[in-house]
Image: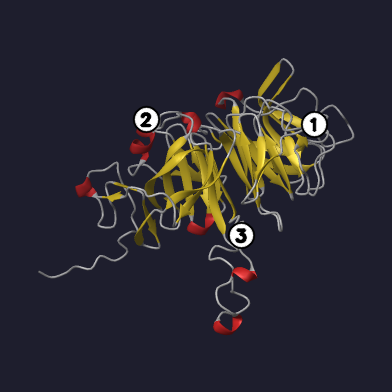
Amino acid sequence: MPYIPLRQIGSGGLVTDQNPYDLELTQFPSGNNVQFHDGRIGKVLGHSQRTSVASAPTHVQGWLYEGNDTIVIGSLQKLYRFNGSTVTNVTKTSDATNYSNSPRWQSEQLGTAMMFNNGAQAPQYMLPSGSRFADLTAWPSGVTTKCLKPYKSFLIMAGYQTSGSEHPYTVRWSDEYDPTGVPLDYSITSTTNLAGETVLSGNNGELVDQLTLNNSQIIYAERGVFAMDFIGAPLVFSFREVFSDDGIINRGAVAEFFNKHLVVGHNDIYIHDGNQKQSIVDKRVRRTFYNEIADTRSIFCQTVNDRSEVWICYANADAPNSQSANRALVYNWAQNAFTFIDLPNVRALTVSETLDSGGGWDDAPGTWGQSSKYWSNASQTTQANSLRVFSAGYVDSKVFQMGDTHGAAVCRRLV
């Protein structure tokens, strides 16, 4: 019997929505915890515990700054900072202070500083040299927002609340500020600054999220998408409707890659460049994905650039906590291929420094005379100078490192 070579066997990924006999030779009808990379099939690595947290983590954010290899961990009522060996309470004022219920924080790195926002109180802000978070400087009294992100030299609110008033269709922005600092004025009635607001069409539902794409800020509503562009004084920004046939299913359900956005809509997962959109799951994994979702609040996305992947995280019926993702649909944009993987019941993912708490030149094996390595690539560990994916394990009250060769064993299947 002759052998038939199958080249690029892993290039097609999983296609679960079609009959197996209709698939290409490079596509598979079922699988779990396998990966498709560079046309090859491989196994997904497990996860390992990096630290436990006193309160169940609902968020995690890498703090990328030279000499500051840490991640910030958010829980329902506290904020912590982890440097690879020690978890420090950095909640504002004191360890005894509690924030309002924060089931899913939103975070941004502003220059070298870190901002955390729970949507119920003033956003929190801390410099790398700081020991505790504090209320964001000059934040307007009584104002809260569930989505606050930087664009150009402004901080943008996608919907906001004031004492007794809701503004779910309004985009509000700060005065212009130096990106090395924070805004000092948010007054929308002043005639001496650039702060302002615009009410967008309510036909597309409430504003949910936002993310920069090239030179535009893309504003996501429940049933539509808008683009926000800087045009300067006196109007400051212009707005245009991009799509009105779908929006976003949950805050955090969008990721940027390769000058495009991947968005989880209510009925489709699509990518767009700010002008045109296309489905990437139709007749492939759309039916499987949407049928598995147990709670839309569990859905969020994370870009993993070094693998050319976007992880679309969600909880299915087997999740012990319906808001914590136990599954991910992984999209590899270089191959335009999908796979499914298991997750350890997480509320958030982040890409950050390795956070190796040990190691140094004294830990290098052997002597320099016995080594054939150059100074430029000799390292105290095999993971030095690389980025890793960390997760907020809500159910286990732990922070995990994903894709660890020494991680927990996972069950793999490919049919």
Whichever of labels 2 and 3 marks the residue nearer the N terminus, that label is 2
The disc label shown at residue 383, or none? none
Residue at the farthest left position = 1
Q: Which amino acid type is shown beneath numbered disc 2?
A: Ala
Residue at x-position 83% and y-position 29%: 187
Q: Is residue 87 left or right of residue 92?
A: left
Q: Which percent across, then down, holds residue 129?
A: 78, 49
The disc label shown at residue 358, or none? 3
Residue 262's place in the image compared with 36, above or below, is above
Residue at x-position 60% and y-position 23%: 202
Q: Which amino acid type is shown beneath numbered disc 3?
A: Gly
Q: Is residue 261 visible?
A: no
Local crowd at mark 3 within 10 Å, few (<14), some, or many (≥20)?
few
Where is residue 77, by image quadrant?
Answer: top right
Q: Which percent across, then down, holds residue 139?
A: 80, 31
Whichever of labels 1 and 2 marks the residue nearer the N terminus, that label is 1
**Element type where label 3 sits in the image:** loop
Q: Is residue 224 left or right of residue 14?
A: right
Q: Is residue 322 left or right of residue 65?
A: left
**Element type where label 1 sits in the image:** loop
Q: CA distance from mark 2 to mark 3?
A: 40 Å
Q: Which residue is mark 1?
A: 139
Q: Which residue is mark 2?
A: 317
Local crowd at mark 1 within 10 Å, few (<14), some, or many (≥20)?
some
